[in-house]
Image: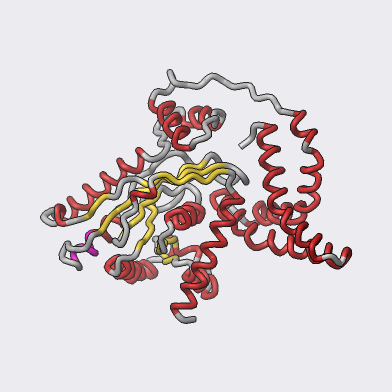
Amino acid sequence: MTAAIKLIYYRIMRTYTQLSLSFFFRKWQVHGKENIPKNAPVIFVVNHQNAFMDAILVETSSRTETWFLTRAGVFGNKFVAWLLSLFHMIPVYRFRDGVKNLRNNDIVFQTCVRLLSERQTILIFGEGDQNMHYHLRVMQKGFARIAWAVQQQNDWKLPLYIVPVAVQYDHYYNFRTRVLLNYGKAIPIDATYQQLPEREFLDVVVEKVKLNLKSLMVHIDHEHYDDIERALKNNRNKKDLMEQLVHDQRVVANWPSSKPAEQKKKTSYALLVLTLPLHVYAWVNNFIPYFLIRFLLNKFVTVNFRGSLKLGFGMVLIPIFYLVQAAIVQAVLHDWRISLGYLITLPFMSVWSVDIWKKGTHSL
């Protein structure tokens, strides 16, 4: 496959993924996108709480063609490795992948240096691996080492930037929840660092990125973590997600004096009854793919990958079922206008049904 065809495939899949995410999330808010430098190499350093979903959201919200550093364990065979490469994913090897494979990281490192020298964008998870908690863990130095190597190779003349990015979820894997993409101020990696010894450079840059990332997200570093998280999730009442973030950060900073009062949320039975025909229509048309995806998730997927693969399974299976159902309607009624109208209603009525149900039951 030629580079041009790969690029076309990548752009088509990115567009389809953007569309899928707009259905998966009830609200997908992006803040600070103006902080992304134009026509310059960029390293996105992202907090890592939700497997592939983190990288996909950054890629599709930034509108840049980004290369992702991904743990090598997901590159299970040659076909999967080829498929992931089409999505600009680059494997990173760890000790659990075998000591021999660690040598491949030298190639990965040089690939990143080359891409940045060509003024492209790469994405690195600063914490290394993921953890489904509102907490920024110890930052690894890989992104700083790459930045150092790039500038050393380019005599510190490349306009290189590190952009910290926080992904903040209301819920990690439920359908039709909310997510905030918060882009911080670009940190220039320029000649002002040139006189620093490498070790000091790494420490300074990692610390600067860590402090910036913490300010962009909810970071709970408290012995009562579970109580705070529960309180935050029970008070998702701000429509604007930046307002919600500021509110949540204030609650965390001032806990326990800032503990919100318990809110008794009553189920709106009237709303659910009035919209019952809608829910019946949605369930009749979605129960097969719904239970199939649920079975696959429960059988084969760990909780850390549940949100990412729920999206992935849905992107593949739901269009297939919708097309089959529309074909059956066409075979029975022999009217393409009715069949097309039916097909168009399926995703929108399904999303509407879930949103009304969540509103009526006050659930995430």
Task: Answer with left or right where residue 36 lies relative to residue 263.
Answer: left
The residue drawn where x is 28% and y is 61% is 146
Q: Is residue 127 visible?
A: no
The residue drawn where x is 47% and y is 47% is 49
**As drawn, 243 above or below 5:** above
**As drawn, 53 above or below 3:** above
Please state the horizontal and vertical placement of residue 23, each as a whole percent of the image. Answer: 61, 51
Q: Quadrant of residue 27?
A: top right
Question: Was residue 61 drawn as part of the magenta stretch in this picture?
Answer: no
Please state the horizontal and vertical placement of residue 180, each as a whole percent of the image. Answer: 47, 43
Task: Answer with left or right where residue 94 lies relative to residue 363.
Answer: left
Residue in front for this viewpoint, 19 or 167: 19
Q: Is residue 191 visible?
A: yes
User: What color scheme is it?
Assistant: secondary structure
Residue in front for this viewpoint, 126 or 331: 331
Residue bounds of the magenta highlight: 148-152
Residue in front for this viewpoint, 101 or 209: 209
- Residue furthest bottom in the image: 2
